[in-house]
Amino acid sequence: MAALAGPAGLRAFGTKVPGWLPRGPWAPLAAGFCNRGPAGAERPEPGPRPTSVRQRDGIRSIVLSHPKRRNALSLAMLKSLQSDILHEADSKDLKVIIISAEGPVFSSGHDLKELTDEQGPAYHAEVFQTCSEVMMQIQSHPVPVIAMVNGLATAAGCQLVASCDIAVASDKSSFATPGVNVGLFCSTPGVALGRAVPRKVALEMLFTGEPITAQEALLHGLLSRVVPEEQLEEETMRIATKIASLSRPVVSLGKAAFYKQLPQDLRTAYYLTCQTMVDNVALRDGQEGIKAFMQKRKPIWSH
Amino acid sequence: MAALAGPAGLRAFGTKVPGWLPRGPWAPLAAGFCNRGPAGAERPEPGPRPTSVRQRDGIRSIVLSHPKRRNALSLAMLKSLQSDILHEADSKDLKVIIISAEGPVFSSGHDLKELTDEQGPAYHAEVFQTCSEVMMQIQSHPVPVIAMVNGLATAAGCQLVASCDIAVASDKSSFATPGVNVGLFCSTPGVALGRAVPRKVALEMLFTGEPITAQEALLHGLLSRVVPEEQLEEETMRIATKIASLSRPVVSLGKAAFYKQLPQDLRTAYYLTCQTMVDNVALRDGQEGIKAFMQKRKPIWSH
Amino acid sequence: MAALAGPAGLRAFGTKVPGWLPRGPWAPLAAGFCNRGPAGAERPEPGPRPTSVRQRDGIRSIVLSHPKRRNALSLAMLKSLQSDILHEADSKDLKVIIISAEGPVFSSGHDLKELTDEQGPAYHAEVFQTCSEVMMQIQSHPVPVIAMVNGLATAAGCQLVASCDIAVASDKSSFATPGVNVGLFCSTPGVALGRAVPRKVALEMLFTGEPITAQEALLHGLLSRVVPEEQLEEETMRIATKIASLSRPVVSLGKAAFYKQLPQDLRTAYYLTCQTMVDNVALRDGQEGIKAFMQKRKPIWSH
């Protein structure tokens, strides 16, 4: 992977020689139920890409990099994020993705300028459908995706946190679904939020628009970990480094099986995962891991 | 709406001139899977109505008002509560409902006197089915329903709390499903409880009948908020007033979409809510809210 | 029930005259989707049974008793546990089951020696399928099953805790799904874990393999109760004794109804449980409980 110079303002993880992702043309978008036409494709993308991305040692770091617009999930931002997530998703060199943000706001959600009468319902539909696609692609992605939050995440920004596999936040972070204040109920964010926190917590957030603290978000399951701000990157990197040290095919098999079994009835869930376990044992890395454990040595993954 | 004098003993919310709901004949009950005949309609309702209700500034307050019977959810109480919930549900003047109770017991659940051999299984069925209807009507109601709890809520009383969209309780409140002690497992309360708290918490409550504190209920998701007793009404009214200040059609659209998508698989959930979002943006209040936000002024809802 | 002498090393519950379960031949395994043949039946079981069991006053105590192998859920251990769970499950004398373990490790999960290439995929399948069967049999069992944990529970050991109806742990206990470290993702444990704790907590555990404390497990719903180590048996016995004092058919009816309704949509769930309630009232113990309550006396259950 070519090492390129990074743009100013990108959060570095304390690395001296970052390995940047090559910036080719955007990866083609995955087909989904949502894309009903080339509406978006016809529009020229304005200005610089609103995300930054780099990858090193198997860890891809995607940074929402438009703090002046509070990292709003405009269509351009969503497509840039989508491209960064899907780029070479099947490469052995990719083990885990971290999504973070520049500035005090992780993301403020949709760009309301894109939701006025002038754009019209076809454009509105494209915005919401692209956003939903990105959220689902995070779950169907072969590697774990971690949200690293240091600040306010609202509306679709809160949805993005809820949609990641793991979410680590600084203790000053907060989370809200305030769409109802501007007459736009956070119905799509409610999909992810309603699957992350208890129903009463989700509904109080959705009906009042009021924020919850990072501690409350941890208590209710929106986050898996809360740390002081100065430890946020270290703690997130600790988790990412751990995941990057594991066998990628084993992690991928496990992630796919987890999401597949979760909505099933118990018997079907066990039927599916019994087969997954047998397949997993038969993987080269499955046998290597077991042998290494019995020989009391570190496993050498072939991926 | 006519202003009537309130009955003694009703909890006032610090208002000087309450706007009472007119007490016409009971609203006709909504048809449901449960009502198999006019069994209930043939019985004369004894004595005064066991609930009190008033409405002001879009906030309807329904009070379980039979403290001598620990606000048991007798068939009369259930029908009175149902009538108060369904009354003019489609009126623009209604924005939010608060359900509270007089006395130290929020509600003790079903009236065991109605469940003896003498009444017979058809009557028993009517009791449970009417109760289930009320619980489902809370979720399908066009406006948010808040439980304001100050005391003990047991069995179907606990179910009522679990069935509301939002639940605020004083720190002295507690919650239990003790039916198993009298040989009547809280199976219908378990429907609401099992969807509100983790499975292990629900089962320990159901199998032992022992109460949990308000703090434990908050920890496990049965409540969205716990406050000192002296702040209970203020905090609940703060939430209700906030909701009453919002666009009713936006809130209604969002509530219906939330409950519709929650049991679906992720793709279906996003498919449904993408459409909801597009519909929401197209609402008059949707466009007004977005315009007001961009013009940095307060929105004026047309509802 | 015959009183037999107990094996050394069994944890006693402070009883002087334990009533041991007779050790007949193993109960036949329940038919399930998993058992595809007599592979297991052809293998002779080596050595002494890896579980101990006794029963007194309606409380059956099953102890994983192979601490030298960290109570690994070998096929022999799984079959011994299954036999102890299913033994005379329909007997009126059985009211509740407690599963605990000898030694500092509750259970370390599958025995990796059984998952090498030499055993082959048919054997691997039998291991995972037998394990899944045991987990499902806990939920379909007519009486409540309590996990009493004092130490580390990992992988399928953590799954066993997550699969019980109630789980009480000492504050020194911890829980992990570390299979990913040895190249074997905890996909079947993820079935139970993913239904017990929020998704983000489950995925961080599955992806990193790192343990959570008993307090975190309580916070997230994996446990229903955490107590100091010296109170663990007392607290667990308090819950078990309470359950053993109740009507067995009422508890059984309620347990079955709870698991049946939980995955259903709300309307179906209420339809099912309304019928359960009517059936429950009609039970002899249902009427006895209600009469005793109204007569202010203790109920006398006929079971």
Image (cartoon, coloured by chain):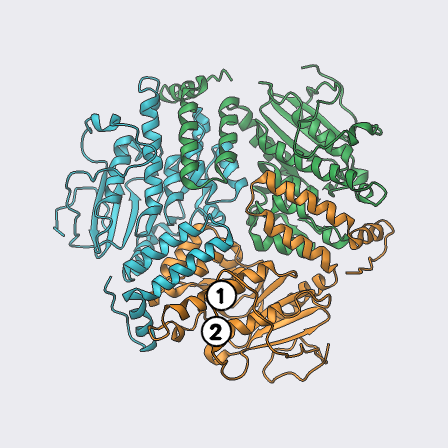
Chain colours: A green, B orange, C cyan
Whether residue B232 is situated above or below residue C10 in the rendered picture: below
Task: Locate residue B266: give its quadrant.
Answer: top right
B145 vs A197, nearest the viewer: B145
Q: Where residue B75 sits in the image (x, y, percent)?
A: 47, 73
- Give the vertical position of A65 relative to A27 (above or below): below
The amino acid marked with disc number 1 is Asn
The N terminus of chain B sits in image quarter: bottom right
Label 1, secondary structure: give it.
Answer: loop
Count the marks.
Answer: 2
Residue designated by label 1: B35
> Percent from the top left, x then y, of residue B32?
52, 62
Q: CA distance from mark 1 to mark 2?
A: 9 Å
* Most distant residue in the right direction: B295
Question: From the viewer's perspective, is residue A76 above or below residue A21?
Answer: below
Furthest residue toward front: B37
Residue C227 vs residue C283, the one in the foreground: C283
Q: Is residue A175 left or right of residue A122?
A: left
Disc marking residue A298: none
Give the residue displayed 47% in from the left and 51% down from the top. Answer: B198
Tell me the quarter of the picture where residue C172 sits: top left
Earlier-in-chain disc, 1 versus 2: 1
Check if mark 1's residue and mark 2's residue have beta carbons within 8 Å. yes
| Residue C35 image point, x, y percent | 30, 31
Residue at image position (42%, 48%) is C223
Q: Is residue B31 visible?
A: yes
Dot 2 crowding, Cα within 10 Å, few <14, some 14–19, many 20+: some
Give the residue pinned by disc 2: B40
